[in-house]
Every structure is written in C-alpha cells, then in structure tokens.
Amino acid sequence: MRIDKFLTETGTCSRSEAGKAVRRGEVLINGRAVRSASEQMDPERDLLTFRGEEIVYRKYTYIILNKPEGVVSATEDGDMTVIDLLPEQLQRLSLFPCGRLDKYTVGFVLLTNNGPLSHRLLSPKHHVEKCYRFTARTPLSDEDMERLSAGVDIGGYTTAPCKVEREGESGNYLITLTEGKYHQIKRMLEAVDNRITFLERISFAGIALPPELSRGEWRYLTENEVKMLEDHGKHS
Ligand code: URA
C-alpha cells in the first residue's frame, strides 16, 4: 500500500499533508525516513510513525457516539449531522451511521465505514437488539405494555414481539427491539393512544452506551466490542 494511502485511510492526515510530512522527514517506516509518499509499505508488517507517533492500521473504523438532541443521523444534511461532531481527520474516513435515530432521539449511534457489517447488523433476519429508554406523556397501563410487547399495528405493519419494562420507579420505560421501522417507537406509542416525550438509545447489539460519554462525545469501540459486532453478524 502507498504511504499516502495508508496515512489518509487511517485518518492521520490528508494526501497533501502526507506529501509535506514526508518531505520534512516526519514519516518513518521501521525507523527509516520515507523518501516519497508514493513508496509502498505493508500495513500488516511495517511500523509507521508519523511525527513520532505510531500509526496502527485499521481496515475499518468503529466509533460510538452519544448523539445529542437536534443532530441528524446522516452524513450530509442542512442541519448538523453526527459526522459534524467528529474531528476533521475522522470526517475524512467516509464513516456513516449504522441505522438512524430521529432528530429528537439521543444516545447510542454506531459510526463505521464497514458497509457489509453494517448491512448485516441492520438486517431484520439477524435480530440485533436495540434497547431504548423512553418517557411517555401518560403512564402506561399493564395492558398497554402487554399490547406493545405483543406487537401493535403502526399503519399497515404489525410490529414484532419485543420486550417492554418499567425502569424501576423512574417513570421511564425500557423497550428492546430487534427491528427498526421508520419512527417505530413513536408510532408504537401512538398505536396505544400515547406519545413519546423522551427517547434515548442505551444499547446496540449488546454494547451499552458508555456512562462516561456525555452527549456529543465519542470514542473508538474497543477490540472486544468490535468482536461482539462481528460475532452478531456471523451467527444470529
Ligand atoms: N424509534 C423512534 O421512533 N425513533 C428513533 O429514533 C428510534 C426508534
């Protein structure tokens, strides 16, 4: 792989910055200064340092973001998007949200550039669990909760059975879905003559929203978390 490709694919810098850094002697391969950004390297074997920092090659990038309200789960929009919340070097990596949250919904968004894995995680046949916390305008009766968990008609489609629980004494509820229809929870609540007043995704594919991430903050997925996603795609 060309050095400049490696540097742009890892989000280290732009192609033109790569050329400049090489000319300044700031890019080393196995301790030796690189002469040209077009030089080849083996990302699996060679150790590249950029301005003294080791750059680890990752074919794909996985990021967990705590989406704030008012931000759109898209790559481009007139309004602020989840991608706009990332630093510039990550904005170059063609990341996209794996599944959408409504503009008013907050919480867990997975950003990746792994298209095939994202496709598998979103496919209904893989039954990937997504858990949400919500507040309803009026408290739900036991009967409403049973109806929601059995499946309700949201306008020509009956939702699959799901888990609905009260979250302790908080007045909030938890709902775990294995599908993702447009405005699904909002429409489910409307089907039992109620309304959502707050909606937060708190886990995705068994990965919980990290409590240390405030709204608008992000971090890379750990190796373990990436493995959890990959295992989901394989076996379920
Ligand atoms: N259901 C909704 O209604 N909105 C979301 O953002 C996610 C699930």
Image: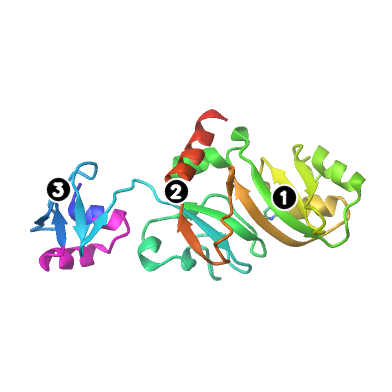
Residue 39 in the image: state x and y as whole percent. Answer: 12, 52
Residue 224 in the image: state x and y as whole percent. Answer: 46, 42
Choose the circle earlier in sequence order: 1 or 3: 3
Main secondary structure along the magenta-highlighted residues: helix
Specify whether 180 is left or right of 96: right
Q: What amino acid type should be assigned to the residue bearing mark 2?
A: Thr
Decide if ligand 1 comes within 8 Å of the CB at mark 1: yes
Q: Are marks 2 and 3 in contact (CB under 8 Å)?
A: no
- Residue situated in front as seen by the camera: 7 or 181: 7
Decide if ligand 1 comes within 8 Å of the CB at mark 2: no
The residue carrying pointer 3 sits among few (fewer than 14), some (14 to 19) or many (20 or more) residues within 10 Å by Cα, namely some
Distance CA(mark 2)–CA(mark 1)? 29 Å
Image point (88%, 57%), residue name = 139
Question: In the image, which disc is placed on residue 40?
Answer: 3
Nearer the observer: mark 2 or 1; the answer is: 2
Image point (45%, 65%), residue name = 86
Residue 83 in the image: state x and y as whole percent. Answer: 47, 63
Image point (26%, 55%), residue name = 55
Specify whether 84 is left or right of 107: left
Give ligand 1's quarter of the image. bottom right
Q: Give the SS element for disc 1.
A: helix
Q: Give the SS element for disc 3.
A: loop
Question: In the image, which disc is placed on residue 222?
Answer: 2
What residue is disc 1 on? 184
Distance CA(mark 1)–CA(mark 3)? 49 Å
